[in-house]
Image (spheres, rainbow, N blue to C red):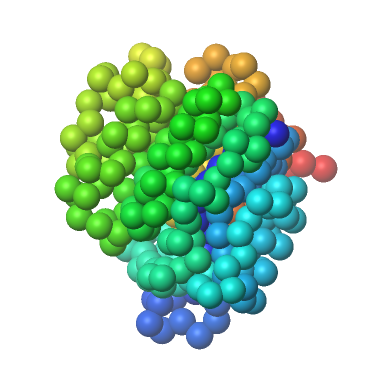
């Protein structure tokens, strides 16, 4: 197993493009969740991926697991909770207007994640373990479980990757600083926006691992390198950060230099924002190669 991710996966009900949430009558079903987005991105790029997490014993949970498995993601260790529901996310989709996101996750199966549900077997042989700040913010037990997972990852010799993925609906800034900032200090790779670093009061230069910073102008940089965002028509910006992380981490897993990792991350993000939901635009390896070639080579852009 190359990659292990652990976190919340919810059922996403996405309103028809351009229609405000309160006016929408048609919705499209998909999966939402920062960790599951990264899992899908890496799986499509050819990396064996395992997802750890919890869903309810309900139709939404069955749908989430089925969609993860459809991308070849290993869900054998997923917990199906008969006493708690799968989380639900409702949102609308606009290219240039504020997007309304409504979470229904209180008391969800994912929030009941506990440390004793995570074992060394789940990360045995993993080269990379990826988490976000969302999971430790779901509940006290989920926070302790995240700490346990990082301990297991370190014992297994895996690279630890963390994206704080700050969502203030989960808690105020001081709680994010209390729970998530210490986890970032334990990571080998941290993905974070400039605004997140400021909110968390974390100096990227003071982190022991590699800091990959997403700038306000949509560029990203690390180790003195900077990659501009590709100029593409934006259909929906949600999911760009997770897509960037998947592209960057794929390059790392293949031993590519940081310059290539940044470029591939930017390319995957550019493909995702051209689609309405978080995962439809995630490419396979051939699709990413074609996108990179089209960005640098003049001529025919239609794949025939």
Q: Residue at x 61, y 59 (%)?
A: 79
Q: Quadrant of the N terminus?
A: top right
Q: In this rendering, does residue 214 appear at all?
A: no
Q: In this rendering, does residue 255 appear at all?
A: yes
291 in relation to 227, above or below: below
Q: Residue at x 41, y 70 (%)?
A: 107
The residue nearer to you, when weighing 218 against 36, is 36
Where's residue 98, x and y in %?
32, 63
In-image side of 89 versus 252 (left or right) = left
In-image side of 66 versus 200 (left or right) = right
The image quadrant of residue 268 is top right
Where's residue 149, x and y in %?
49, 39
28 in relation to 166, above or below: below
Q: Residue at x 42, y 36 (%)?
A: 162
State the residue lying farthest toward the right. Answer: 304
The image quadrant of residue 139 is bottom left
Where's residue 205, x and y in %?
26, 19
2 in relation to 108, above or below: above
Q: Quadrant of the C terminus?
A: top right
The image quadrant of residue 54 is bottom right
Q: Residue at x 41, y 53 (%)?
A: 142
Where's residue 254, x and y in %?
65, 21
**Number of callouts in the render?**
0
The residue nearer to you, when weighing 288 against 165, is 165
């Amino acid at each position: 197993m190359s990659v292990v991710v652990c976190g919340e996966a919810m059922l996403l009900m996405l309103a028809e493009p351009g229609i405000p949430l309160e006016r929408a009558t048609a919705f499209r079903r998909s999966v939402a969740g920062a960790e599951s987005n990264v899992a899908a991105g890496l799986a499509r790029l050819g990396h064996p991926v395992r997802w750890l997490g919890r869903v309810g014993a309900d139709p939404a949970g069955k749908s989430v697991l089925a969609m993860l498995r459809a991308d070849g993601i290993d869900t054998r260790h997923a917990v199906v909770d008969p006493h708690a529901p799968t989380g639900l996310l409702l949102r609308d989709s606009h290219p240039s207007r504020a997007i309304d996101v409504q979470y229904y996750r209180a008391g969800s199966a994912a929030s009941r994640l506990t440390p004793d549900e995570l074992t060394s077997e789940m990360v045995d042989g993993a080269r990379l373990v990826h988490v976000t700040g969302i999971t430790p913010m779901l509940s006290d037990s989920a926070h302790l479980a995240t700490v346990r997972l990082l301990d297991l990852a370190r014992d297994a010799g895996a690279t630890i990757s963390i994206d704080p993925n700050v969502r203030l609906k989960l808690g105020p800034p001081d709680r994010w600083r209390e729970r998530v900032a210490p986890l970032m200090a334990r990571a080998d790779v941290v993905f974070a926006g400039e605004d997140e670093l400021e909110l968390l009061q974390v100096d990227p230069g003071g982190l022991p691992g590699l800091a990959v910073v997403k700038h306000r102008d949509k560029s990203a940089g690390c180790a003195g390198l900077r990659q501009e965002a590709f100029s593409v028509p934006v259909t929906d910006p949600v999911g760009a950060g997770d897509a960037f992380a998947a592209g960057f981490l794929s390059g790392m897993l293949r031993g590519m230099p940081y310059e290539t990792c940044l470029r591939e991350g930017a390319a995957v993000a550019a493909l995702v924002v051209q689609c309405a939901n978080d995962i439809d635009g995630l490419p396979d390896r051939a699709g990413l190669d074609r996108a990179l070639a089209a960005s640098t080579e003049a001529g025919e852009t239609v794949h025939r």
